[in-house]
Structures are given as structure tokens and as C-alpha cells.
Image (tube, rainbow, N blue to C red):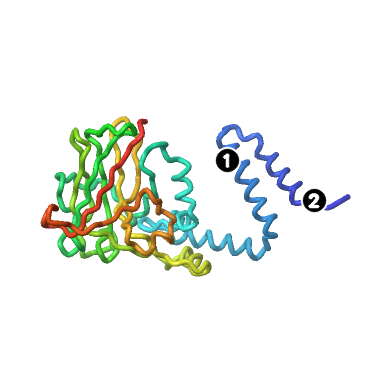
Amino acid sequence: MSAMTPQQLTKQVLAAYAGTPDPRLRELLTSLITHLHAFATETGLTRQEWLAAVEFLTATGQKCDAERQEFILLSDVLGFSSLVDLINAADGATECTVLGPFYVPGAPTRAMGEQIGRPEDGIPTLVRGRVTDAAGRPLDGATLDVWQSNSDGLYDTQDPQQPPFNLRGVFVTGPDGGYHFRTVRPASYPVPVDGPVGDLLRGAGRHNWRAAHIHLIVSAPGHRPVTTHIFDAENPYLDSDTVFGVKDSLIRPFRPAGPADPPDVSYITEMDFVLAAQ
Ligand SMILES: [Fe+2]
């Protein structure tokens, strides 16, 4: 009688889950078990390494609380969040990217052109463009929910000096689909490394900086919303964003304002958004 092989064990485990009544759950479990077993078999995973992984995941869960989501951060730095975004992207629409941990629903609706920050938050910048459908027709009543950090790389929720909903705002387009708002030029910021994900990044020799960006959720009735960023073309972290959020189509120059531009801003960036029908 020969000893059981890893392949035989994998087969046995798969068979035990083959009767899962829900077809989608059955598909997910079958694939998960197949890939998880293959990972251990291929790498010759040791018992010590298995235990280290269990301890790492335990610590990841223990680091989570109402404000801190270490599992999402783990998913982000492994590129898994971006992968799920890619798989679910709508054809022909503006590319999406990570939501990140700093979104707060309920930001105030602001008048078109309004400044969402304060003078001390950074260099005044005008952002403008159009929201259209996939055929290029302007979308009336499209909503842009915008949020970003100040020039120190801090969001209002991280910084007691900033009032609630600072550097956040909701803008609604008119019949021409156009939008414009004032903000500050965004800064790079580090993701937190005082938890297990920090150990992972250090162990891999990776830095923990995000490329500077403005967050937006763009939506319109009858269309699929897009959660995305505008990235600053001059940022040094575009090629190494710690959460793999950068897509070429989302990078925009922040050009110095000229004599024909509004006198109260130093930089101007332009980005159009395309939404696919639902
Ligand atoms: Fe962000």
C-alpha cells in the first residue's frame, strides 16, 4: 500500500465540497481549494511557514477596528483590490481604481467652481472637464463625489486641524456635462506600516507611498458609477504606487495657470469622465 500523495488529498477535499448546493459558492470553493493546495504543493510549504501565515493573518484581523481595515490594506498592497477592480471594469468607461480607506459618504454638495479646501491646505488648483456617456454625449445631472488629502498628505479624518469634510465635496453637472472645482495640488502619502502589512512591505523591501491623487466617484442616473483617481503626472511614485492603483489613462499634467486662466489658481488639470450605460 503506497502513501497518499498531495494530489490524492486535493482530490479528496474537492470531492467533499462538490455537493455545495449554491452553484457560485461551489465554483468559488472548488477554485480556492485547487489554487490553495497547488500553492502549498508547489512551494513545499513547511509547517513553520504555515504557522507563520496563520499568525500573520491573525495579527491582521487583530489590527482592524472601526477606523483601521488592515485586511483591505493587505489586499491593496498585494494588488488584489486592483485586480478585482480590473475584472469588474465596464468596457468603454473611464478606468477605475481603488476606493481606499478614506472615503466618507455624505460630503456637502457644493456650487460648481467652489474651493473644497482652505488656503493653508496647499497650492490652489483648478480641476475641470466633462462627464459623457460612451458615445460622447454630455451627461446632465452627473455627480462627482471628490475627496483628497492636503499638501501634508493628510485627510480630514486623520488630521484634527482640518474641519470635517475639508477637501471633500459633491458637484452636479448641468446639461453640458461640464464640471469644475477648486482644490489644492494633491501630495503623496504613506500607507500605515505599524501593523502586519508594514512587516510584509519591509520584508519585501517595498516602500509604502501612494502616488499623489485626487479621488472621485463619478455617477449618473442609468449609468454604472466609476470609482477612480486623477494622478499628478509629475509624481515620483507613479511607477511604484504601493497599492498598484496607477493606470496610464488616469495620469494628468498639472500645468501652471496662464494669463487666460482664473487668477486665484496656480495649477490647472483637466480630465473627462466616460460612464457606461447600466
Ligand atoms: Fe487617497
Image quadrant of ligand 1 equals bottom left
Residue 125 location in percent, x, y?
20, 56
| Residue found farthest to the front | 259
Q: Position of residue 148 (x, y in %)?
A: 27, 55
**Sequence order check: which comes first, mark 1 or mark 2?**
2
Q: Residue at x 39, y 51 (%)?
A: 248
Q: Amino acid at mark 2?
A: Met
Residue 164 visible within the image: no
Q: Looking at the image, which is closer to me, 15 or 193? A: 193
Quadrant in the picture for the C terminus? top left
Asked whether 68 or 179 is in front, the reply is 179
The residue at 52%/60% (across/down) is 58
Indicate left or right for 76 with 188 as reference. right
Count the marks: how many? 2
> Residue 46: x percent and y percent?
68, 63
Q: Secondary structure at mark 1?
A: helix
Rendering quarter of residue 109: top left
Check if mark 1's residue and mark 2's residue have beta carbons within 8 Å. no
Amino acid beneath label 1: Leu
Question: Which residue is label 2 attached to?
Answer: 4
Residue 244 lies left or right of residue 226; in this view the side is right
Horizontally, residue 222 falls left or right of residue 162, namely right
Q: Please determine whether, in this image, residue 163 is positioned above or below residue 109.
A: below
Residue designated by label 1: 28
Residue at 67% x, 63% y is 47
| Residue 166 % position (x, y) | 21, 56
Q: Farthest residue in the right direction?
A: 1
Q: Is residue 202 visible?
A: yes
Few, some or many residues within 10 Å of mark 2 (<14, 14–19, 20+): few
Determine whether the residue tagged by mark 2 lies in a helix, strand or loop.
loop
